[in-house]
Amino acid sequence: MHIPGSFSSPSESRAVADLNERSREIFRQIVESYLTTGEPVGSRNLSRILTHPLSPASIRNVMSDLEAAGLIFAPHTSAGRLPTETGLRFFVDAMMEIGDVTTEERARIEAQMKAAASGHTLETALTEASTLLSGVSRGAGVVVTSKSSNVRLKHIEFVRLDTTRALVVLVSEDGSVENRLLDLPAGLPAGALVEAGNFLNARIQGRTLGDLRQAIEMRREEMEKELDTLTAKLVEAGLATTVGPAESRQLIVRGQANLLDDLKAAEDLDRIRLLFADLETQTDVIDLLSRAEGGEGVRIFIGSENKLFSLSGSSMIAAPFRDGSQKIVGVVGVIGPTRLNYARIVPMVDYTAKVVSRILEQGR
């Protein structure tokens, strides 16, 4: 499985490529200890766990070289060492041994997802995906997907609220309901809302909202003959309102409480507060997740590689999923501390995305 790399500079890339076997072994132990405990590891402890024993003095020399290469750092004077973000990226790209999802885990994921999707809305299934991923990580499970523009419609209704506004009610084949406010044109005939709804419902035929808008555009002359000018404008305004780009994406987050577990210090709590603030800024999270739609397979964003996490020092693992026409329509993933268990979470995110894709292909 390919994980896109992101080294800070060519010189750093060359430095890590030149590491010998002994340096790589010491670096691996520092990273794996950090991913397990979150704590720095010192030369004395390393000398006890290395496959090929070395004296603490020899280990300190290697650690000095690793620090010069930008792969590790000392959080405090005379403390052990932790991996830098560059070090984590190198480990993920070049050294990490990605596990696989067991047969039992595959069966459990598929059973939970199918149960959530059967007889329920697509949002229910996606919420289950985010809940499931939060359960296998130390992070929050996240899903971003298009709203009604990618869901097949069953019914549209215009409901007048007052003289200037109406509600556009969209009922999808999966049972989900979405409402949008619509400004009404002045002088609209009394029966125009019912007439507009009837006109659209006669042409829905299991189409998505985007398909319906395209079909109406292609038959503009037919619409203008059948409807008066203001009612025709109402139809167009209703469709345009519901597929506006600012409201076309939906973010689902589950398991934020996991991020409060296993805090090591006051600075950890500060970091989590910053991450919660990031998650509340939904537009930025959606933008970041949407970047994972740009390629195949799993994407990993570590710490300040992305400006969203530059303060909280968090990571994200995400993978896209597709609909029945193989179009990418969303992303599932995990957001959490940089010491996420990448080797375990990467294949879980990848497999969950594939299960979501299969559910969409089969129409649940």
Image: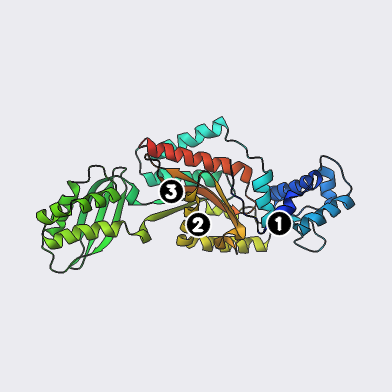
Q: Which residue is mark 1?
A: 12
**Is residue 39 visible from the viewing direction of this image?**
no
Q: Residue furthest top?
A: 103
Q: What amino acid is found at the position of numbered circle 2 in the picture? A: Leu
Residue at figure coordinates x 57%, y 40% from the top left = 347
- Name the mark on residue 296: none
Residue at figure coordinates x 84%, y 40% from the top left = 52
Task: Return the x and y of residue 12 as percentages of the image width and height.
Answer: 71, 56
| SS assignment at label 2 | helix
Q: What amino acid is found at the position of numbered circle 1 in the picture? A: Glu
Left or right of 206 in this view: 136: right
Looking at marks 3 and 2 on the same chain, the residue that comes earlier in the sequence is marked by 2
Left or right of 192 in this view: 174: right
State the count of labels: 3
- Give neighbour class at mark 2: few <14, some 14-19, many 20+ (Cα, 10 Å): some
| SS assignment at label 3 | strand
Q: Which residue is mark 2?
A: 288
Whole-number angstrom distance, CA of label 3 to CA of label 1: 34 Å
Asked if the residue at tag 2 contacts the one at tag 3, i.e. Cβ–Cβ closer than 8 Å, the answer is no
Say which quadrant the N terminus sits in: top right
Q: Which residue is mark 3?
A: 330
| SS assignment at label 1 | helix
Task: Return the x and y of residue 312 as percentages of the image width and height.
Answer: 60, 62
